[in-house]
Structures are given as C-alpha cells and as structure tokens.
Amino acid sequence: MTTTGSTDRIPAALRTEALEQLLTERGLIDPNVMDKFITNYETNVGPLNGATVVAKAWTDPEYRQRLLDDGTAAIKELGFAGSQGEHIVVVENTASIHNVVVCTLCSCYPWPVLGLPPSWYKDPAYRARVVREPRKVLSEMGLELADDVQITVHDSSSEVRWLVLPERPDGTEGLSEDQLVQLVTRDAMVGVAKVQAP
Ligand code: FE
C-alpha cells in the first residue's frame, strides 16, 4: 500500500466504499437505495440490452452475421456502447458447440450489454474452475451438456469482452422479437445457462 498520502493507489473498490460510507453518514444517500440501484443494473438494465441484441440476431439473419463478424459495431447499431464495451466479440452457441465466458484475472465483463457482473462471476472458484473443468462447473450451475457437445471457455480481458449468442430454443418460432427479448437471460449470455422456451 502507498505511504505517500495520495489516494491514487488505493483500490477503486476501497475508495468507493469509503465514499459511500461518508455520504451515508452525512445523510446524503440511503445505502438501501444504493443496493437497489446496483441490483437493478445487475439484473435489469444491462442484461436487457444484451437480450435485445440476441433477439434481433435470432430474427434478422443479416444482423446475426454482422454481430458475429464485428460484435462491437453491430451492438452499437442498436445504441449500446461505452465503457467496458470497446471491443466485444460475440460467439454463437449451437447444438454441438457451447461457449462460456470467464475472466480468470479479475472480472472483465461487457457492461453495455450485460450491466454489472454477478457475484459468482467474480468468485475465485468460478474463475479458476470453469477453465479446468467447465462441464462439471456448468453442471453444478444447473446446465447439463451432453458428452458430445464441445465446450469452449473464453477468457475476457481488458482487450476483449465476450458475449455469448445463445441458441434460440425450439418452440419459439411464433414469438415476436419483443417476446423473445423477455426470454433471454444474463446467464445464457455468459454461457452458464440455456434460454428456455416459455
Ligand atoms: Fe478482468
């Protein structure tokens, strides 16, 4: 740790915590409201953007191709861009290939399409184990994959953030793009779950 008295070497998380505590003590913010705000970003705002991208790719073959060719540009077409989304690569899950995303080093994640990473994504156990034994980890998370399905693990970094284009489930042929958006989950776009038909 620094002994210079400067704050610029103190980790951002610590500084943020100190700031939140100060603002709470002075009555400027309510920590419960802050938690709700963060939960909203974790579970609603971010993943909804990703779900919009996925539903568009499912219903528009040309868009799907652009998305797989240049994820960042195709995602930006729908208005999603920004911090931690400067270089997004999209990989497609099929009946025979399953992609799953991790950041082995820390918690790199495509914020513009998925919001903030869930706690399990930042968990050292997930980060270490999903690389070594992905089939077992996925099974523990509720996703059983057949032995002949090839699993590819993608390591996100500050250079590349990965987004999984999940397989469109059978039985959704009659659904509109808006209805499809509602089916796509955050976990399916990280590759630890499949999208289920309603
Ligand atoms: Fe990281």
Image (cartoon, rainbow, N blue to C red):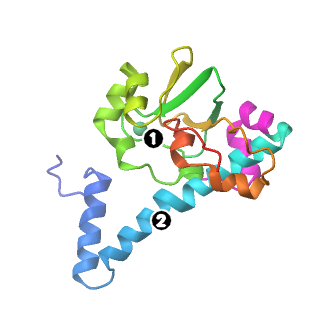
Question: Picture coordinates of residue 198 (x, y %)?
Answer: 64, 51
Q: Nearer the viewer, residue 152 or 162?
A: 152
Which element type, helix, strand or loop, lies under badge 2? helix
3D distance between C-alphas at marks 2 and 1: 19 Å
Q: Quadrant of residue 149?
A: top right
Question: Can residue 96 be seen at all in this image of the molecule?
Answer: yes
**Ligand 1 in which quarter:** top left
- Which region of the structure is painted magenta? 64-82
Indicate which disc residue 40 carries: 2
Residue type pointed to by label 2: Asn
The mark that comes first in sequence, 2 or 1, is: 2
Q: Is residue 8 above or below residue 190?
A: below
Position in image of residue 175 (x %, y %): 78, 52
Q: Residue at x 28, y 77 (%)?
A: 23
Residue holding disc 1: 108
Residue 14 at what x, y percent from top left?
25, 57
At label 1, the amino acid type is Cys
Query: Tag 2: Cα neighbours inside 10 Å, few (<14), some, or many (≥20)?
Result: some
Dividing the picture into quadrants, the one containing residue 70 is: top right
Q: Residue at x 69, y 45 (%)?
A: 54
In the image, residue 187 lies in the stretch drawn in magenta: no
Q: Position of residue 42 (x, y in %)?
A: 46, 57
Q: Is residue 151 above or below residue 179?
A: above
Cβ of mark 1 under 8 A from ligand 1: yes
